[in-house]
Image (cartoon, coloured by chain):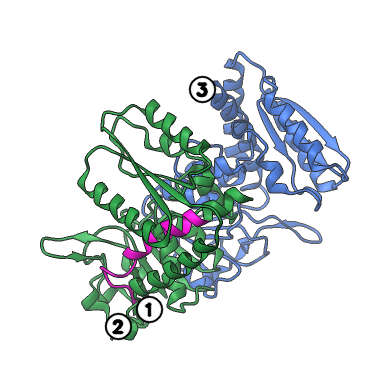
Chain colours: A blue, B green
């Protein structure tokens, strides 16, 4: 069974090791600044793990916090200051922001060359146009895992479930670039199993435990499970792993599949930002 | 048979009539400026028909021509001048440009609020993000025809053939916004008929005469044929119209289907640009 598992920890480790070497060769300190607003506990944990990962590969890390009644103006001024600061390589605004803040407006203040999350309109447009861009971390991680597991994408029938700006939508562009045929399903799709039963590769990113079972997948298909669902006593993905594992060729576990790739690609994106700014 | 035909001329006429009324109510002259480079005969014809359509609905039209050895710098200076000219509502650079010119660079000089073709990175990114944007004319025309023919898109299985920046890619975003399930096929797709045979709606935009025949379509499906192929003695689409017409529920003819919608949406986009600039 083990040879079926696409090991995200292992893939992540290799990328981080290579990154560490590359960062050593750069004759400038790289620095990621994270802006965090309010007291959301999950956000604190995520930001901490990003900081830890930066330190491990040799990227300086700074967290700037604001109270949750901060105004848009104050955030905009801070981001503009960071845009103009040559010592800052990358800027990340930890989401979600409080309701009184226009998230899209704030994200688009970030200079696209410092946009480590790849969520500015400019980076989204460039990705859609197949230009060099900063790619949203989780979507990039899915492609990394497919390549790590030697999965060819050319002419493959790939089904994406979920159309978020963070995962589903950027994956459309990334998969088309690899010459896959791409179908996008979502909450309004009526005949989901008609899609999944014909898929060579299924990428599931909806946050719905056990959405995909054995009867919905093709023999020898490849499953990338992006879902991270916190149940009472454990974490699981969108795919019923135990049910499908004997039928499919390869599958990512949850945890230990796509999860570790997200922060790894944040680190990759800091280096990409440095290279963007150099040119 | 006639009730099966989605009449692009008729749809176009209604939109242009409404537009004419709207333009009359605007207390400012709208003006479209087209930049054309070189002596390409097809480009001359296209630009003429754009000019004629503008005049018909009451939009001022100016064509600026350059020799095909014009430098990027000269084009950039001209576009910047037009960006800053308050009397100019929309700017269009007629493609193709000569090989020594970086097309993408030139297009992105256009202020996105004057980008009537919807091809700047900003408008592409906004469309992808489901924000208000200028939508590429032909893609917008496809959606117009589906609505004109009372075709519901929600939960429909839509297959797009062709992944161009002008048609296929913007249609992904437009169709997802309407809650359709979307599949994108292209030259590297191996089992095209597996996709088309299951499609409620097929949108074909590849430029390949007779690519789609009766055996490839589902009973009562809806076919939008974006192809315009010039054969020896006539123009035809990508779909074998005579072969499929008795099997499908609705179909666009070529000519007289999607064709007229492209210039119509250029006119729509001039008005949209005016509204963008007002806000």
Secondary structure under tag 1 reads loop
Asked if labels 1 and 2 touch by Cβ distance under 8 angstroms, the answer is yes
Q: Is residue B45 visible?
A: yes
The residue located at (54%, 46%) in the rendering is B113
Is residue A134 a member of the stretch shown in magenta? no
> Which element type, helix, strand or loop, lies under badge 2?
loop
Nearer to me, A29 or B268? B268
Tell me which corner region of the image, top left, top right, bottom left or bottom right, holds residue B53: bottom left
At x 46% / y 65%, what residue is drawn?
B20
Residue span colored magenta:
B251-271
Does residue A157 appear in this view?
Answer: no
On the same chain: label 1 and label 3? no
| Dot 1 alpha-carbon crowd within 10 angstroms: few under 14, some 14 to 19, many 20 or more | many
CA gap between label 3 and label 2 equals 56 Å
Of the pair B24 and A131, the residue shown nearer to us = B24
Q: Position of residue B247 (x, y in %)?
A: 30, 83
């Amino acid at each position: 069974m083990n040879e079926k598992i696409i090991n995200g920890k292992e893939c992540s480790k290799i990328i981080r090791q290579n990154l560490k070497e590359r960062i050593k060769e750069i004759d400038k300190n790289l620095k990621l600044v994270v802006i965090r607003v309010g007291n959301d506990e999950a956000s604190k944990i995520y930001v901490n793990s990003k900081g830890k990962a930066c330190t491990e590969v040799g990227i300086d890390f700074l967290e700037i916090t604001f109270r949750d009644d901060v105004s848009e103006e104050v955030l905009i001024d801070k981001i503009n200051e960071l845009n103009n600061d040559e010592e800052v390589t990358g800027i990340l605004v930890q989401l979600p922001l409080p309701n009184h803040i226009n998230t899209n407006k704030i994200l688009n203040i970030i200079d696209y060359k410092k946009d480590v999350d790849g969520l500015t309109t400019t980076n989204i447009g460039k990705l859609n146009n197949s230009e060099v861009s900063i790619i949203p971390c989780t979507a990039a991680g899915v492609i990394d895992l497919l390549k790590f597991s030697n999965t060819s994408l050319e002419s493959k029938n790939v089904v994406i479930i979920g159309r978020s700006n963070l995962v589903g939508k950027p994956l459309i562009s990334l998969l088309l670039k690899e010459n896959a045929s791409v179908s996008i399903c979502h909450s309004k799709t009526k005949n989901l199993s008609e899609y999944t039963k014909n898929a060579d590769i299924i990428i599931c990113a909806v946050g719905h435990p056990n959405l995909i079972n054995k009867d919905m997948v093709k023999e020898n298909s490849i499953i990338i499970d992006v879902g991270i669902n916190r149940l009472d006593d454990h974490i699981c993905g969108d795919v019923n792993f135990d049910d499908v594992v004997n039928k499919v060729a390869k599958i990512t576990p949850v945890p230990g599949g796509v999860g570790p790739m997200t922060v790894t690609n944040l680190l990759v994106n800091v280096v990409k930002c440095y290279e963007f700014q150099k040119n």
